[in-house]
Image: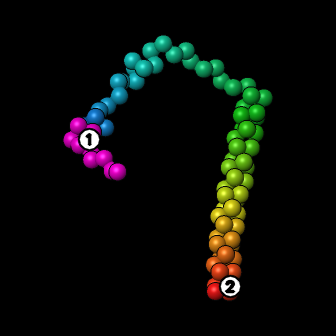
Amino acid sequence: MMSKFTQRDLTSSLDLPPPASHAGANVTPVSPLSDGEWQKREALKVKMIAQRVKLKLMRDRTDELKQALERFSTQRNTMSA
């Protein structure tokens, strides 16, 4: 069941968040990363991207196998009929 989008929903979605000066008033600055920390961080980024690519390939392969199974089932049903 779809819900209606009311004027109140529209105005609440347009409300602005509080100014950044209030949000970051008590935040301490972050020290720059050392070379070792930077390299670890970059290596982690590369690993994450590689894992996402592998996951995408697995999902695509799963979809292809499902479609192949559906085609096989359809062909088997037409041959037995």
Foreground residue, 40 or 51?
51
Q: Indicate whether residue 68 is drawn in magenta.
A: no
Element on which disc 1 rests: helix
- Quadrant in the picture for residue 56: bottom right
Of residue 81 and residue 76, the one placed in the foreground of this image is: 81
Q: Residue at x 31, y 38 (%)?
A: 13
Judging by the rendered image, the residue that carries numbered circle 2 is 80
Tell which circle, 2 or 1, labels the residue nearer the N-terminal end.
1
What span is colored magenta in the figure?
1-10
Q: Residue furthest toward the front?
A: 81
The residue nearer to you, when weighing 13 against 40, is: 13
Residue 44: give x, y in percent of width and height: 73, 38
Mark 2 packing: few (<14 Cα in 10 Å), some, or many (20+)? few
In the picture, residue 61 is in which quadrant? bottom right
Could you say where residue 66 lies in the image, as x and y percent from the top left? 66, 66
Residue found 69% across the figure and 52% down from its top: 55
Q: Position of residue 28 (x, y in %)?
A: 55, 15
**Colour scheme shown:** rainbow
Q: Calculate the distance from the C-alpha at mark 2 to the C-alpha at mark 1.
A: 57 Å
Give the label on residue 10, or none: 1
Q: Residue furthest left?
A: 7
Helix, strand or loop for the magenta stretch, by majority:
loop
Q: Residue at x 70, y 67 (%)?
A: 65
- Classed neighbour count for the residue bearing mark 1: other residues with Cα under 10 Å, few (<14), some (14–19), many (≥20): few
